[in-house]
Image (cartoon, rainbow, N blue to C red):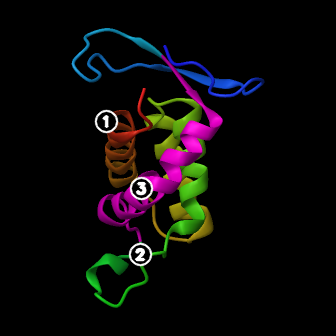
Amino acid sequence: MGQASRVGERPVTRRLDYVEHRGNASLHDVCVTGSEWQEWWRRSGEADLRALVMEQWDPIGVAAFEEAASDEYDDYLGPIASRLRREASAEEALARYLHDVRTDRMGLPADEQRDLAAAKAIAEWYVAAGPSF
C-alpha cells in the first residue's frame, strides 16, 4: 500500500470491487495521496476522460462533427472524476449522474442503456488507467 508523500498529507483510500485488477484476483485497498491523484489528473487523466466521454457517451452527438469542440462536456468531467475518486466501482453512481445530466440539464430523452454502458466504460478505464497504485 502506498504512503503519503508529505508529512500531514492525508491519503485517499478506496476499495476496488473488481475481481481482477492488474493481474491480481482479489479485492485491493488502494491508497493514493491527493497530490498523486492531482498529478495523474493533470498528466493524463483529464484528457483521457474527456476523450472517453466524447466517444462513449456524447448525448448530443457532437463527436460526429470534425469541428465540434473537444471540450463540449468539460463541465461534467470534474463531477465524474469525483465519483471515481470516491469509489472506483462507481458504475451505478456514474450512470445516475450521466442520466441526470442528459435528462435534467440537457433536456434530452432518457437513454439509460447508453448511460450505463458509458459509466461502465469509464469505471473500467479508471481502474486500468487511474493513478499508479
Label located before the other in sequence (1 or 3): 3
Nearest to the eye among marks 1 and 2: give it. 1
Q: Which residue is mark 1?
A: 128
- In magenta stretch: residue 108: no
Q: Residues within 10 Å of mark 1 (few under 14, many from 20)?
A: few
Magenta residues, start to end = 30-59
Residue at 41% in and 75% down: 60
Which residue is denoted by mark 2 in the rendering?
A: 60
What residue is shown at x 21% (from left), y 18% (from top)? 23
Q: Which residue is mark 3?
A: 49
Q: Locate residue 24: give its quadrant.
A: top left
Q: Please identify the residue farthest to the right as the structure is shown.
A: 8
Image quarter hosting the C terminus: top left
Looking at the rendered structure, the secondary structure element under dot 2 is loop
Q: Position of residue 85 (x, y in %)?
A: 56, 36
Give the CA separation, mark 1 to mark 3.
Answer: 12 Å
50 horizontally vs 26: left or right: right
The amino acid marked with disc number 1 is Ala
Front residue of this view, candidates 126 and 109: 126
Looking at marks 1 and 2 on the same chain, the residue that comes earlier in the sequence is marked by: 2
Up-down relation of residue 97 to residue 58 (above or below) = above
- Residue 8 at x, y = what percent? 78, 24
Look at label 2 and name its amino acid. Answer: Ile
- Residue contact between numbered discs 2 and 3, judged by CB atoms under 8 Å: no
Alpha carbons under labels 2 and 3: distance apart: 17 Å
Q: Position of residue 19 (x, y in %)?
A: 29, 16
Instruction: Please determine whether, in this image, residue 34 is positioned above or below residue 47.
Output: above
Name the kind of residue labelled 3 in the image: Leu
